[in-house]
Image: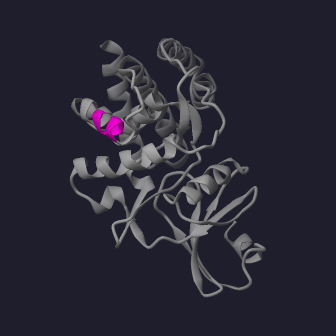
Amino acid sequence: MQNALYTLPCFSKVESISVINAGLSQKCYKVYADNKFYFAKTVSGNAEAKMAVPADTAGFSPSVFYHDQQWLVTDFIDAENLALNISNTKGKINHAIRLMVQCHQLNYQPAKLSAQTITNELINKPHFSALKKTELQQYAELVLAPLNNSKNLVCCHGDLNFSNVLIDQQKHTWLVDFECACLAPAEFDLAMFIAVNNISENKISGIITQYQHHFFAAKIDHKLLYAYLTFSYFINSLWFTNSYNKRHEIALLKLHQQQWKKFTLSVRQ
């Protein structure tokens, strides 16, 4: 896969390629070509690039240099991700929510969120026994019942992990990794943000207030947000356990356990 970068039509001469190991999903590389550094990411289809282009135009995501069905190439941003750069959670939330609002205000419509499809794909894995699949499907029915994505839809990032926010030396922040982008209620993006970053639920009220401060026209349905929060814990726990089954990394198992514990507490409330 890495060798394919040498033949991309966007480069005249590739001098060096190094693997970027951060992240848990797609393979990424730092490419030095034509006297400039680039970030190259493997993709499946052009959905992520279609989202990255308007985000680039809006000025909160790195400039898209090239894309096709297999690659997304952007300017390389010399920066740390937010998870490593800022120690206090409040500061991280401030940066992330501002970027989320910018994303929600984009005049672009990605594919609509299909919660049913997501849960089906996560559950129908060969490593789950028939009994386990039945149990998970019962949970899924419980989780999906209160969800509503028929109105007030916005362009959601879908995975606003602190590690998907870059902050450079000039303190400018950039939002990256749009592979989970979808058209959904703002409540979904807020819920996934809270879940994937393992933010304490006692901070939810403040997060909503901050969101509405930046996007004063938005009206957040608290009940719907909590319904999407339960959904987020559920699908995250399944994603991590499926990833662990492939890679057997203890960090993935711990993340699964963390999200599953939050999920079970949520369904009891």
222 vs 161: above or below = above
Q: Measured from the top left, where is residue 225 in percent x and y?
A: 40, 24
- Residue at 57% over, 63% down: 28
The answer to whether residue 157 of the structure is visible from this angle is: no
On whether residue 211 falls in the magenta region, the answer is: yes
- Residue at 34% over, 52% down: 95
Q: Measured from the top left, where is residue 180 in percent x and y?
A: 57, 42
Instruction: Say which quadrant the N terminus sits in.
Output: bottom right
Q: Measured from the top left, where is residue 82 in percent x and y?
A: 35, 57
221 vs 15: above or below = above
The answer to whether residue 207 of the structure is visible from this angle is: yes
| Quarter-of-image position of residue 53 | bottom right
Instruction: Say which quadrant the C terminus sits in.
Output: top left
Q: Measured from the top left, where is residue 185 in percent x and y?
A: 51, 28
Task: Read off the magenta span.
Answer: 209-213
Question: Is the image coloured rainbow, by chain, by secondary structure, or in one colour?
Answer: one colour
- Residue at 52% over, 39% down: 156
Q: How many marks?
A: 0
| Quarter-of-image position of residue 127 | top right
Q: Is residue 88 left or right of residue 79?
A: left
**Main SS category, magenta section:** helix
245 vs 33: above or below = above
| Quarter-of-image position of residue 26 | bottom right
- Residue at 35% over, 72% down: 170
Q: Residue furthest front?
A: 217
Q: In this view, does 266 lie to the left or right of 21?
A: left
Q: Is residue 217 left or right of residue 57?
A: left
Viewer-nearest residue: 85 or 118: 85
Q: Is residue 179 left or right of residue 252?
A: right
On whether residue 242 falls in the magenta region, the answer is: no
